Amino acid sequence: MSESPQGIGKGMIYVAWIIALILLTIFFNSFLEKEYNPNQQLTTHFSGDGPREVVLQRNSMGHYVASGSLNGAPVVFLLDTGATMLAIPESLANRLELKRGAQMQMTTANGTITAYSTTIDRVTLGAIELRQVRASITPSMREEEVLLGMSFLKQLEFTQRGDTLIIRQNSQ
């Protein structure tokens, strides 16, 4: 039983369409990720003992989202000057094996929530690195991004110009 050339041709067309759809999906997922986090590859400036600077671009929704790390593990940060400290989703905290400290109540825009204190040994945003940063493990957070709050930001200088945010860590 041999297949007709027409049947083989139709099969090849179906395969071509499937491959095209897969490639389009990969392309648009990459495009959407870059729209959400335009700071996947951070622009950093530093020389010797001088200040370290990170330049962030605002995303299409008006937020500053950037790639960084907690204790060396890659994460995505959402800068939040309204957050008292770093807020880490519980699922991410479990993967990073963060120690859960005292339970605490926190007031958010969505009401009062329960969270747990913790300390991050090393928080890195481009060339900027801070150690022993207070944070909270927040079970109610459903997203995977970390809110980069004031326990990190208050130790830095930042300046906003248009859609650009410059964060500076002076030499210590």
Image (tube, helix red, strand yellow):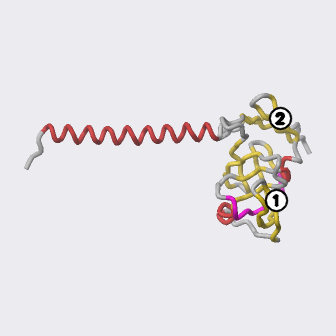
Q: Amino acid at mark 2?
A: Ser
Q: Which mark is residue 47?
A: 2
Horizontal side of residue 98 vs 134, given as left or right? left
Question: Which residue is the extreme one toward the top?
Answer: 162
Q: Is residue 79 magenta?
A: no
In the rendered view, does 148 fall on the left or right side of 35?
A: right
Quadrant in the picture for residue 160: top right
Position in image of residue 124 (x %, y %): 76, 49
Disc 1 residue type? Thr
Name the image quarter holding residue 169. top right
Question: Which portion, as a residue range, is magenta?
Answer: 130-141
Residue 96 placement: quadrant: bottom right
Q: Main secondary structure of the magenta part?
A: strand
Q: Which residue is mark 1?
A: 107
Q: Which mark is residue 95?
A: none
Between the C-alphas of marks 2 and 1, the distance is 40 Å
Q: Could you classify mark 2 by the number of other residues whose Cα lies within 10 Å: few (under 14), some (14-19), or many (20 or more)?
A: few
Residue 101 position in % (x across, y down): 80, 70
Q: Is residue 134 magenta?
A: yes
Q: Identify the residue at image location x=15%, y=37%.
A: 6
